[in-house]
Amino acid sequence: MNHSSSYALLAEPIQKALWKLGWESLRPIQEQAIGFIQNSQNDLIISARTASGKTEAAFLPVLSVICQNPASSVQAIYVGPLKALINDQFRRLEELCEYARIPVHRWHGDVSASKKQKFVSNPRGVLLITPESIESLFVNRSSALNSLFHSLSFVVIDEIHALQGTERGTHLRSLLFRVDQCAINPPRIVGLSATIGDEKLSAEWVRPNATERVDLIKDDQSKKSIQYGIFAYQSSKDDEEQDSQSSHELSQDLYNSFSKGKNLIFANTRPDVEWYTDELNHLAAQEGRPDQFLIHHGALSRDIREHTEKMMQGKIPFSTVCSATLELGIDIGNVRAVGQIGCPWSVNSLVQRLGRSGREEDQPQIMRIFLPEDLFSFTQHLSGQLYPPLVQAIALTELMLESWVEPCESNSGDLSTLVQQILSVIAETGGLQAAELFKKLIVSGAFRHIDQTLFVDILRQIGQEDLIEQTKQGELILGLKGEKIVRSYEFYSAFATPPEFRVVYQGQAIGMLPTTYLPSENQHFLLAGKRWQVVGIDYDRREIGVVPARGRKRPKWDSLGPNVHQKVRQKMRQVLAENKQIGYLNSSASQLLEQARTTFSNADLIHRDLFALSLTKTLWFTWTGTRIHQTILAMLERHKIKLLDYGVAIELDLSFNQTIDLLHQLVRTKQEPRVLAKMVDPKFRRKYDEYLSEQLLEWSIAEDVIDINGAQSVMVELLKQFN
């Protein structure tokens, strides 16, 4: 191996392990990380593309520290968002740790009780674990926590971009602060991510109130060549023959693009994953190649998901149609190309999905986006004639090429996860004073923005709901309902999962369907990429019995996309306003863009964002992010304005001049976040929101949904167009 100054910093057993494993050199990101971790006591965020060696960049120096300072507890935790990801990393670390004689353990739902007990009896080395399994340790192994973590030195958090600004991220952050309280010295955090949108916000998530203690290194050496295209398919609702033809054309193009080699095809919804898996396998069967396309999404049984992962890791090349479940870095080997059906949700998601291809140094990253014909069906409405899905796909692509990704969103209004953590701490301790609880979760925990008055209000509210109760000595203990919640396996996760029915064929679980969209008896539907007919529904056991069938129908699941960032909407406006040719569009997409630009120009939307539809109706193109757009809707709702929301635009039942007058009024008037929060629905957005009062939910919405400054700023800029 080529020696370097960073290599010299590694402990001798780690150097020997690298030599035995045949490493020839360290990558630049690994060189940097070794220096940062060995020569500093700061936390660190490592940002680099998929397959760039981030995990080793973190663990080579971490394992070196462990080698040189062995202790009788876990010394490093790796937190992964998925069990499959933990299993992958276990395989990668096991060999390295074996040479260095460092024990490495997994802890998740599939690890046997005997292995877990053996680990608890003699905790050492590295522990790989999910956030939900850390929660399980606090609830079920509270007496072992100090012996497990007293000498913990490092916590490595993978895929931090997928955690920031989510209930799961808040949950994990709270759990890690509680782990800190079990350790002699708070462990250092090493965050791994392929994308960092806002360095300061990411540092704040890693170490609240001490961002100066967080270093960041980026792998800027990893620019790869990209082969990229956006393909749009046109049809008219008035022409069923053309509609069918263009649908077949999309499926055929998908098949031609991804029937060779190992590929991933992402779809935004589970119904689309199911539909296109069936379509593609039907085309493959016509060529005598059955089951060429595999399937992967969160509602499938574990056996089916693991079968897909195993087949993708094998030597026979398969392609998998999947949801975001394969967006994160589960190791399925080298993927030739990536497909995307429908407009991607965000730049972040686009970067992640593109990064799944071309893992080898000399290979390009290949991605094709397919926009189905129903996105461009004939529409009389002006906003629809701008073809937002196509323009958004272009805007996301342009921002990706500019190396911009979304910063993490604020999640400071997440009272649901605070309720969950209150129950968890009480379950861990058996009972404690409110002041101790406040210190543990608020003063020294992840909820530092919650003041004492609000905290007391939450305790009183969940006391009324029988989640907790107070003894005569003033200790908080679990109420009857609280005990029932904590005993449930679902308690370990902070995010909500909708009630579901299990789909079963000959005793074998295939997957789950939501109770809101159950098929009726004898009805056909798709699941796991196969066609089924319902033969019976057992409502007591929540099971649907099925047999294979020839007919098919799309299953249904609720699907809400994440918020669109303001910069994406502004880039969409820019794409429409300019004449720049886009080289990665197919001819149909180019024609649609040209039509959209002509409509945009003819309506004079280049110079103004308000358009008079008639003497009594006005269309307002807000060109802003979801949060500000929702705030504007709340303001209009409060003034009882009749409207239609088109996402990029709002149609108002007001004349043009009345709209201008209203905007002046909204800018001048002091707006109250809690008042506007009353206008926002739904109120229940998180797992434990049902136990919170209306006032607490309005506080939560005011924190996380309402952006008055942003909304008024958009209005001020709009009014400048008419001065």
Image (cartoon, rainbow, N blue to C red):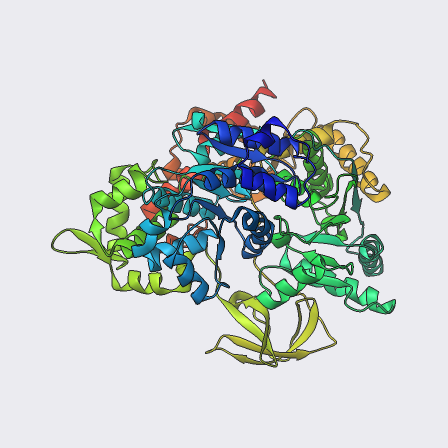
Q: Nearer the viewer, residue 219 or 626?
A: 219
- Percent across and percent down for residue 284 are 83, 65
Q: Quadrant of the C terminus?
A: top right
Say left or right for 343 vs 689.
right
Say left or right for 357 vs 150.
right
- Percent across and percent down for residue 436 are 23, 44
- Percent across and percent down for residue 318 are 76, 59
Q: Quadrant of the N terminus?
A: top right
Q: Nearer the viewer, residue 568 or 296?
A: 296
Q: Nearer the viewer, residue 281 or 248?
A: 281
User: Residue drawn at (62%, 59%), measured in percent from left and top?
Assistant: 297
Q: Is residue 705 visible?
A: no
User: Residue drawn at (30%, 60%), measured in percent from left and top?
Assistant: 482
Compared to residue 518, the image places residue 470 above or below, namely above
Say left or right for 263 vs 97.
right
Compared to residue 699, the image places residue 548 above or below, namely below
Compared to residue 289, the image places residue 154 above or below, namely above
User: Residue drawn at (56%, 34%), measured in percent from left and top?
Assistant: 46
Q: Nearer the viewer, residue 18 or 480?
A: 18
Q: Is residue 642 visible?
A: yes
